[in-house]
Image: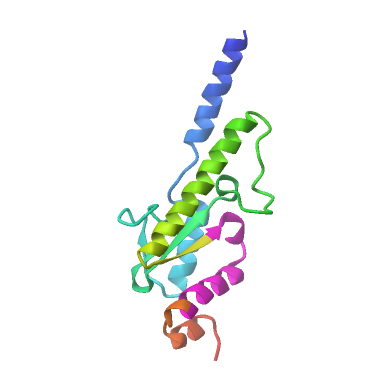
């Protein structure tokens, strides 16, 4: 009886986990649409860069990671909850994710690129995202301010 229940839970969990996408997620697509509307052109899922970033802006030597708050443990975010079952498994999983994220950030920095992390919960606020992009891309890369001002409707 217990074995049947565990097998059923495992099959259901397996279906749920297999349905979680790692590429072309809704938050990622929203970020891409915003960047494109701001006039930026980019590549997707750069396999030649550490961590296969979600978005690559070669002109600015910048990569963008769109992180899910749950999987990457966005601090003080309501979406970064920890499941009540199998706590040890999840804690180890999340620690490994955080460690890998830090290693990838270091590797990106070592090759002379910068990285921007966009959290899933930030995607809902387009004005915040726009300001974050401008701050990261313009201030650190001396991009064309006229183009940026035009995109932000600043005279």
Residue 139 in the image: above or below residue 72: below
Q: Residue at x 58, y 11 (%)?
A: 3
Instruction: Give the quarter of the image for residue 131.
Output: bottom right
Q: Quadrant of the C terminus?
A: bottom right
Residue 23 position (above or below residue 65) = above
Tell me where residue 130 sits by quadrant.
Answer: bottom right
| Residue sitting at x 61%, y 70% | 128
- Please name whichever residue, 33 or 132, is drawn nearer the observer in this view of the structure: 132
Q: Main secondary structure of the magenta part?
A: helix
Placement of 112 over or under 3, stated as above or below: below
What x and y, as percent, mark residue 13? 55, 28
Q: Is residue 47 above or below residue 86?
A: below
Q: Which residues are magenta?
A: 118-139
Q: Position of residue 74 (x, y in %)?
A: 61, 53
Residue at 50% from the left image edge and 56% from the top image edge:
66
Magenta stretch encompasses residue 120:
yes
Residue closer to the observer: 82 or 105: 105
Task: Let me know if residue 16 is in the magenta part.
Answer: no
Give how far across and how far down residue 118 sits, in percent. Answer: 53, 60
Say how many tags the image has: 0
Quarter-wise, where is residue 62 in the image? Answer: bottom left
Point out the image quarter for the N terminus: top right
Q: Position of residue 150 (x, y in %)?
A: 49, 85
Name the residue at 61% across, 56% down.
121
In the picture as drawn, the residue positioned furthest to the left comes out as 48
């Amino acid at each position: 009886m217990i074995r049947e229940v565990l097998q059923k839970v495992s099959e259901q969990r397996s279906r749920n986990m297999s349905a979680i996408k790692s590429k072309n997620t809704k938050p990622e697509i929203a970020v891409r649409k915003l960047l494109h509307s701001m006039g930026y052109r980019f590549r997707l899922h750069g396999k030649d860069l550490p961590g296969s970033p979600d978005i690559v802006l070669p002109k600015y030597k910048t990569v963008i990671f769109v992180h899910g708050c749950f999987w990457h443990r966005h601090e003080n975010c309501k979406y970064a909850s920890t499941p009540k079952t199998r706590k040890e498994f999840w804690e180890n999983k999340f620690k490994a994710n955080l460690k890998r994220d830090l290693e990838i950030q270091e590797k990106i920095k070592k090759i002379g690129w910068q990285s921007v992390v966009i959290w899933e919960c930030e995607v809902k606020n387009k004005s915040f995202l726009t300001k974050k992009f401008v701050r990261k891309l313009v201030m650190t890369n001396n991009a064309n301010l006229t183009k940026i001002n035009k995109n932000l409707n600043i005279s």
